[in-house]
Image: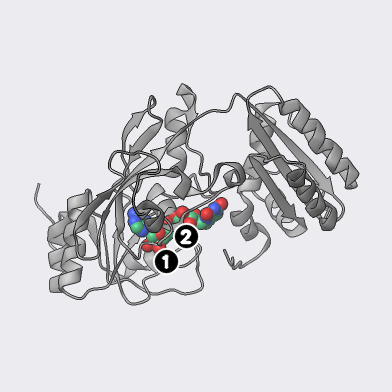
Amino acid sequence: MRRKRLQTNDPHIQALARIVGGENSILYKKEDLIAYDCDGFTVHRHLPKAVVFPKNTEEVAAVVKYCHEHDLPFLARGAGTGLSGGAIPLNGEVIISLVRMKRLISVDLENRRAVVEPGFVNLKLTNSISDRGYYYAPDPSSQYCCTIGGNVAENAGGAHCLKYGVTTNHILGLEFVLPNGEIIEIGKNGIPDPPGYDLIGLLTGSEGTLGIVTKITVRILKNPEAKQTVLAYFDRVEDASQAVSDIISAGMVPAALEMMDQTAIEGVEAAAFPVGHPKDIEALLLIEVDGISAGISEQIEEILRICRNRNVREVKVAQTEEERARWWANRKTGFGAMGAISPDYLVQD
Ligand SMILES: Cc1cc2nc3c(=O)[nH]c(=O)nc-3n(C[C@H](O)[C@H](O)[C@H](O)COP(=O)(O)OP(=O)(O)OC[C@H]3O[C@@H](n4cnc5c(N)ncnc54)[C@H](O)[C@@H]3O)c2cc1C
């Protein structure tokens, strides 16, 4: 196949293109770069110098090495859903996009782990193993599009992190490229809590400042035997908040315990998955308990009692998996839903 010629004389762009395999793996024209001028934090916008799309660790390392040797600033980018501005090219960086490194490399059910490339989309992991009774616990609301590499960099959490923890609790091993281009592996054998410094903990949440993650070994979990979800409507935020405290002080750790206030409810009801929540309540709680079947209905009874004690207007338990899924789909549109009721929205995440 004949390679297309680059329409630029910039020697750095020509060199980077050679590293990643030519014109189809690099963007450098202004009209192409505009899509990369910010991430989910849209307040500041700056054009990158170029965007490269490496296909493997060696190409990532070679790009980083080139940038290091030529004093070119660079940054990693997954799906660009980050809300803290980490993928914004403030200094005309070369963006190293990991979206072409999107393979599920292996699944080891016996040892409850999977190995993925950084561009692998979060939800795809659970979708790939759910028919065998397993799932990947960290569930940021952006999970249908954000990448596991981006989750590692942001130490992403989700609705179920109350019981199951955030990304760092589910990472067993990492391969990454240091800022000088060297490739390093930590947690190579995927053993939880190995002796020595907690380097995985250090890397997870470092927002790409310590290295670019190129391979991730994650913990996968067996689906809980039972799961029940409660939806509670409150006239006053104070009552909903007090119910949350009561549930925790009763010694329960729900899998999820989420509150939405009136503005959030207005947004999600105007978005893709309306449930029919009343518009005149101040707050709702979405409470999920899971685990072994024994004891689940007692926990649900206790939660219903606590909500009633705190003047709940209406409280109900999901009757079907469809109903439960609808409630969650509604909740998970919370961020994007603001676009349905407001021209702009700034999150202090
Ligand atoms: C609608 C919506 C809902 C959200 N809900 C949640 C939520 O519930 N919980 C939550 O925690 N976050 C949430 N977020 C924020 C965001 O989705 C997460 O931070 C996610 O982890 C970012 O992943 P990404 O692939 O989009 O990363 P990007 O936005 O592309 O990058 C984020 C940061 O990670 C770095 N990075 C990306 N890939 C790598 C890599 N391979 N190696 C090293 N550094 C890398 C980037 O340089 C940047 O600093 C939400 C965002 C949106 C838009």
The answer to whether mark 1 and mark 2 are in CB contact below 8 A is: yes
Q: Quadrant of residue 45?
A: bottom left
On whether ligand 1 comes within 8 Å of the CB at mark 2, the answer is yes
Residue at the image position 49 percent from the left and 66 percent from the top: 84
Label 1 SS: loop
Find residue 282 and report its horizontal and vertical position in percent: 82, 56
Colour scheme in use: one colour
**Residue on which disc 1 sits:** 86
Q: Nearer the viewer, residue 338 or 143?
A: 143
**Residue density around tag 2, few if under 14, some if 14–19, many if 20 or more, within 10 Å:** many
Q: Nearer the viewer, residue 127 or 106?
A: 106
Q: Amino acid at mark 2?
A: Gly
Res 302 label: none
- Judged from the image, the quadrant occupied by ligand 1 is bottom left
Find residue 321 and report its horizontal and vertical position in percent: 65, 28
Label 2 SS: loop
Residue at the image position 66 percent from the left and 22 percent from the top: 293
In the picture, the quarter occupied by the C terminus is bottom right
**Residue on which disc 2 sits:** 82
On whether ligand 1 comes within 8 Å of the CB at mark 1, the answer is yes
Find residue 101 and report its horizontal and vertical position in percent: 29, 47
